[in-house]
DNA sequence: GTATTCTGCGTCACAGTGAA
DNA sequence: TTCACTGTGACGCAGAATAC
């Protein structure tokens, strides 16, 4: 039986672009840099990917309070970027939230073929979901050890420990995409912790 | 003494720049 | 090309300061 194929996407701004890594078992079978959402979707469909982990918010904030998923992670001392309301992001003149809008386009493109994870126990068919590399690192190493300053070596070490060769992953964005793919594998195996709710969206993190 | 408010710190991601 | 560093933006948390 062929191992399940999963993918991870690291969403970037307009200059950096998106990065896709496709994993079959422990083998990296595909690897795209600076790709459009449509190109990544085409690649995932061609390779019969079952689950896609995306490093970008799947929902904008609604109302004054932050997203439940981000609050729940913060209580575990896993800090993430605070997603603003869509109007706030649009109003920002700095272009700082450009990568979040790119993430929105990725979810839009994938939505028709990879329904967004809704928190259920059972995964039926294809799925895409929100995750992020720092939370995955915390899940594997613990919040006391995981550090943004050490993200390069720490994240590569996690992948190597899972049997995934990192030599072809030349940038930190590729490594992050591979970690998202790893989270996708854990989701299909049912070995994850989920944070959040339906209105604010769920963040999926490997559960060990 | 208790409750509330304020402040500083640490976290993530991004972009941009410069060095190796 | 890659890596390291700085600044931006918003948040939660812990401890200090203030008010009652």
Image (spheres, coloured by chain):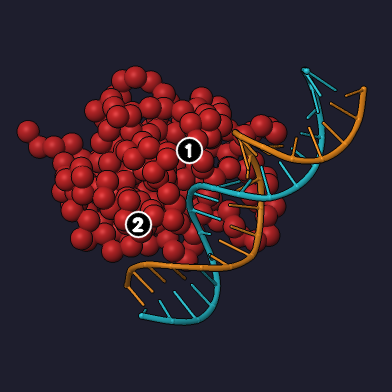
Chain colours: A red, B cyan, C orange
Q: Nearer the viewer, residue A149 or A124?
A: A149
**Badge 2 vs badge 1, beta-carbon distance below 8 Å:** no
Tell me what residue is drawn at x 26 percent, y 59 percent.
A169
Percent position (x, y) of residue A159?
Answer: 25, 47
Which numbered marker is on residue A126?
Answer: none
Q: Is A143 above or below relative to A16?
A: above
Q: Secondary structure at mark 1?
A: loop
The answer to which image quadrant residue A171 occupies is bottom left
Label 2: few (<14), some (14–19) or many (≥20) C-alpha neighbours in 10 Å: some
Locate residue B13, reporting x and y percent: 48, 53
Residue shown at 22% from the left, 61% from the top: A168
Residue C19 appears in which quarter of the rendering?
Answer: top right
* Number of marks in the rendered image: 2
Bin the neighbour count of mark 1 within 10 Å (Cα to Cα): few under 14, some 14-19, many 20 and up.
many
Q: Position of residue B17 (x, y in %)?
A: 54, 78
- Residue furthest out toward the left: A1
Q: Pick whichever of labels 2 and 1 is earlier in the sequence.
A: 1
Q: Position of residue A135 (x, y in %)?
A: 41, 40
Disc 2 to disc 1, how far (Cα)? Answer: 18 Å
Q: Which is more toward the observer, A24 or A74?
A: A74
Pointer 2 residue: A152
Q: Which residue is labeled 1 in the image?
A: A78
Q: Please identify the quadrant where the N terminus of chain A is shown.
A: top left
Element under label 2? helix
Residue at 31%, 20% (x, y): give it. A122
Residue at 38%, 37% (x, y): give it. A142
């Amino acid at each position: 039986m062929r191992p399940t194929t999963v993918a991870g996407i690291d969403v970037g701004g307009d200059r950096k672009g998106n990065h896709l890594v496709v994993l079959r078992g422990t083998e990296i079978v595909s690897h795209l840099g600076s790709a459009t959402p449509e190109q990544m979707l085409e690649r995932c469909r061609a390779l019969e990917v079952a689950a896609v982990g995306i490093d970008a918010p799947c929902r904008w904030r609604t109302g004054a309070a932050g997203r439940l998923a981000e609050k729940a992670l913060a209580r575990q001392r896993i800090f993430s970027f605070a997603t603003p309301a869509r109007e706030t992001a649009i109003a920002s003149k700095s272009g700082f939230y450009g990568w979040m809008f790119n993430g929105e386009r990725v979810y839009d493109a994938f939505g028709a073929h990879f329904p967004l994870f809704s928190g259920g126990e059972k995964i039926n068919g294809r799925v895409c979901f929100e995750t992020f590399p720092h939370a995955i690192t915390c899940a594997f190493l613990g919040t006391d050890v995981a550090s943004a300053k050490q993200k390069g070596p720490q994240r590569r070490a996690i992948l190597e420990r899972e049997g995934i060769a990192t030599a072809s992953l030349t940038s930190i964005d590729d490594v992050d995409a591979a970690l998202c793919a790893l989270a996708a594998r854990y989701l299909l195996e049912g070995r994850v912790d989920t944070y959040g709710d339906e209105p604010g969206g769920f963040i999926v993190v490997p559960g060990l």
